[in-house]
Image (cartoon, rainbow, N blue to C red):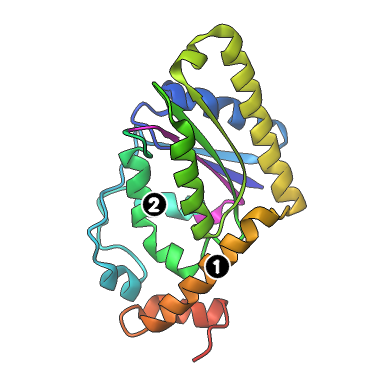
Amino acid sequence: MKIVAIVASPNGMNGYTGMLVRPMVEAVQGTGAEVEVLSFDTLKVNFCRGCTQICHTTGKCFQDDDDLAMILTAMLSADGIIFATPNYCFNVSAQMKALLDRSTFPLHCGKFQGKYCATVVTAGGSDNEVVEKYLCSILTQFGFRIAGGVNAVRLALDDPDTHAEIEKEAGALGLRLVHAIEKQEVYPGQEEEREMGFQIMAFLVETMKKDWPMAYEYWKKNWNLQE
């Protein structure tokens, strides 16, 4: 089993987001699973240029001066992904948003359907739940099954007592992600939304088949999309 942790913070594992990812990684490693940490203190993903006619025709983005290809390869090879982000202006970080935006082609191909994930959100103040809700809504549309999430504010992480409790919660989430993958758990509350997103994507790809030939051919081969 392989788990990829995406730490979409410019502070990487040295920031508050990394504080919560670390116990998750340690818990996952304790089960014998492989873990790869992709940290945005050293990685770069350029902003999307909105030219879907290129990626949907060739199957790849024309921007080759960043780390996107490597990150997507790691994500697609993983059984589970930890999406970790700080709360910046009541949303995910620019780094996380760039990654989600640049994942348009695998999203439209349904390449993440059935994979498992967990979320981590931290903030200096409040409203982590707003960011977590947004992130989960996007990941459901990507086709992920969400095993759970953990979030915390700086004051709680700076307090020794609450910090220990949150670290314990994060470690438990890491184990929950591993167990969900092992048991291929299904979450009834998510399935209807996942299926709706899948059907909408099938309709969109079929409708756009002249402009998105690569995505269309992928759907015909892998998802039995009819001519």
Q: Nearer the viewer, mark 1 or mark 2?
A: 1
Q: For residue 153: magenta?
A: no
Question: Is 35 on the left or on the right of 121, as rendered?
Answer: right
Classify 23 as above or below 5: above
Report the front residue among 19 and 186. Answer: 186
| Labels 1 and 2: the sequence-earlier one | 2
Q: Amino acid at mark 2?
A: Leu
The answer to whether residue 28 is visible is no
Residue 100 circle label: 2
* Spot occupied by residue 198 in the image (x, y as percentages of width and height): 53, 69
Give residue 26's position: percent from left, percent from top.
63, 28
What is the secondary structure assignment of the residue under circle 1? helix
Residue 128 % position (x, y) = 46, 31
Q: Please indicate whether residue 145 sits to the left or right of residue 141 in the image.
A: right
Drawn side of residue 23 relative to residue 102, left or right: right
Percent position of residue 221, x then y: 53, 81
Q: Residue furthest top?
A: 160
What type is the residue that disc 1 sits on? Answer: Met
Residue 219 visible in the snapshot: yes
> Dot 1 surroundings within 10 Å: few (below 14), some, or many (20 or more)?
few
Q: Does residue 105 lie above or below 204 as drawn? A: above
User: Label 2: how many residues lie within 10 Å, few (<14), some (14-19) or many (20+)?
Assistant: some
Reply above or below: 169 against 199.
above
> SS at mark 2?
helix
Q: Say whether marks 1 and 2 touch (CB < 8 Å).
A: no
- What stretch of residues is rendered in magenta? 76-88
Query: Magenta stretch: residue 77 in it?
Result: yes
Give the residue at mark 1.
196
Q: Which mark is residue 150?
A: none
Outermost residue, bottom side:
227
